[in-house]
Each structure stands twice: as C-alpha cells, then as structure tokens.
Amino acid sequence: MAKLISGKEVSAKVRAEVKEECEALKAKGIRPGLAVIIVGDDPASRVYVNNKKKACAEVGFVSEEYALPEQTSQEELIALIGELNSKPEINGILCQLPLPKHLDEKAVINAISPMKDVDAFHPSNVGRIMIGDYHFLPCTPAGVMEMIKSEGIEVAGKNCVVIGRSNIVGKPMAMLLLHENGTVTICHSKTKNLKEVCAAADILVAAVGRPKFVTADMVKDGAVVLDVGINRDENGKLCGDVDFAAVEPKASYITPVPGGVGPMTIAMLMKNTLMAAKIQNEL
Ligand code: NAD
C-alpha cells in the first residue's frame, strides 16, 4: 500500500504561506497583482483562468483578466503585454496557453518581461533554471518537487525517471530533480526499452498525456510515483498517466488524479507572483 501524497493538502499549505506573506506585504502598502490573458473561448482554458483568479482572491492578490476575442492579432496581443510590462501594480503576467493557431506562442512568451514571467516560460528564465540561478520555477514541476519535499523524500543519489520531454513539464522537471542531485533519465516517444528504464526508477514522474500509460510492470517495488497527466478515461472520467489501481500497491508513495499535482500548479503560480512582487519592490 502506497502512501498518498495529497495535492489538496500540500497546495493548501503553500497557499496559506503565500497568504500570510501577502498580508505582511500589504502592511507595507504592497499588494501583489497578476494579469491573466485569455484569447478565444476554449472551455478548458476558461476553467483554468477562473481557478487562477479564484486563487488570487483567496491569497489576497489583485487579479486582472484580459479576455480577448479569438480573432485578436499578434500585434494587439503583443501591445497589451507591452502595456502590462510597464504597469507597476501588475507583478505577474500570464498568457493562458494554448493560443489560437494564428498566434505565435514563442513570440508572445518572449514579449513578457522576464521579471513578470510567473509561468517561467521566457527563454531567459529557462536559461536561469538551467544554471540553477533563478527567480521563478515553472509551476507544475515546482509543484511536484514541493510534494516530494512535503514527505521528506530524499532525491540525492536516487534513480529518477521522467517520462515526457515537453518544455512546460518534462524538461524542467528533469532539471529540478538534477538540482536535488538525482540521477536523472528523460524518456520520450522514441525511447527504447521504456519499461526497463522506468522499472529501475526510485522516483518516477509521468508527464505523457495518455490515460493509464504507466502500468504495474513499469514500476519498481517501493518506487515514488508522481502523476502529472490530466486525461479522460474510456468513460470520460478524469484520470492520470498512471494506472493507479495497479500501480498503487507496488509504490511507496503515489499522487492521485484528481487531487494530486493539479492543485499544486496554481499554488506555485501564487508563490511565483508573490516572489515577483517582492523582487519588483526590492524586498
Ligand atoms: P506534451 O504532449 O507536450 O508532451 C508529452 C510528452 O510525452 C512528449 O515529450 C512525448 O515525447 C512523451 N510521450 C508521448 N508518447 C510517449 C510514449 N509512447 N512513450 C514515452 N513518451 C511518450 O504534454 P505536456 O504538456 O508535457 O503534458 C503532459 C501531461 O501532463 C498531459 O496530460 C497534460 O494535460 C498534463 N499537465 C498537467 C499539468 C498539471 O497542472 N497537473 C500541467 C501541465 C500538463
């Protein structure tokens, strides 16, 4: 039987800490502000944006929503980001991805001031993470690390396997595990012997985007299993990348879906926005 690492509990703790620090900032006349840009009417993006605004209100931040129509041009979007970059009461800017196809995601990310890039997607922040000298960490991998730390799980010297190499999850996840002195392997769609590589992991992070992809034969007895995936199963029910029922009896720790890594992502966004406000106010 694995111990469940509850993202609900760990994220509530992170948000409570952010709230406390926010109150201390408010006493100094500083109120952190996050601008959230959404282009078009993708229902999933709408849910994420609403959740981010709700989290801001809960910790005491100001949030501004910029809901732009689907046909917004690249120039209009970049111009809005330019305005927000120079707006002092806005400390963090995020543009909800994915963007409509006619917009250039890379150019949009590049337009956000690195000091306000609370998603940590700007190349300058990505580079800083690579050399271990960063202000912000990307929210989902940072959330996974917070869950690992919440249980006092040692990473140093452990075999860590990350399945997935996206810029948002897989690659930075591997880097954060490396910073903690893990011995890290990144697997992806071209990896040979995936099963054997995963079965040697002490810490296994799944960020693939396929329901029940990680089966029991891919997991070593006593492994720590962190499931980043958010998928729908054959019945339309929310599930992760890990076949939870089959893997849970083998693992020592496991994160559920829902209620696992998901809630951590927004909590870490709040942490980054707080950090941005502190840096911009030279605290
Ligand atoms: P992505 O599609 O960009 O990347 C998926 C990765 O999986 C790729 O690098 C690919 O090489 C790898 N992959 C695909 N098929 C594979 C195979 N057969 N064997 C090995 N590797 C394979 O996805 P992403 O943005 O990194 O997201 C991954 C999952 O995490 C998705 O389910 C997404 O919804 C979820 N996600 C969750 C959160 C959260 O807050 N919990 C945040 C971001 C993403």
Image (cartoon, grey):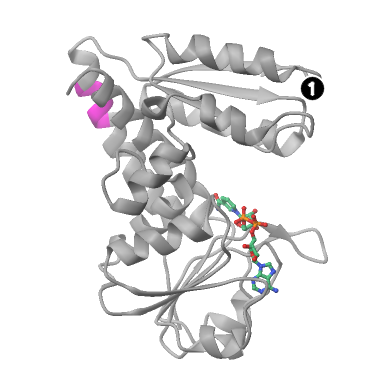
Q: Is mark 1 within 8 Å of ligand 1?
A: no
The residue located at (52%, 86%) in the rendering is: 197
Which image quadrant is residue 67 in? Answer: top right
On screen, 230 above or below 104?
Answer: below
Residue at position x 36%, y 35% in the image: 272
Q: Is residue 57 left or right of residue 134?
A: right
Can residue 6 be seen here? The reply is no
The x, y position of residue 82, in whole percent, is: 52, 13
Q: Secondary structure at mark 1?
A: loop
Is residue 249 shown left or right of residue 232? left
Q: Where does the image place residue 268, in percent across and percent down from the top left?
A: 40, 42
Location of residue 235 in the rendering, given as x and y in whole percent from the top left corner: 82, 63
Location of residue 181 in the rendering, given as x and y in whole percent from the top left corner: 27, 70
Q: Which residue is mark 1?
A: 70
Report the magenta residues as a range: 20-24
Mark 1 residue type: Glu
| Quadrant location of the C terminus in the rendered image | top left
Would residue 251 be counted in the magenta stretch? no
Quadrant of the image occupied by residue 206: bottom right
Q: Is residue 106 left or right of residue 121?
A: right
Judged from the image, the quadrant occupied by ligand 1 is bottom right
At x 79% / y 22%, what residue is drawn? 70
Vertical placement of residue 167 versus 1, above or below: above
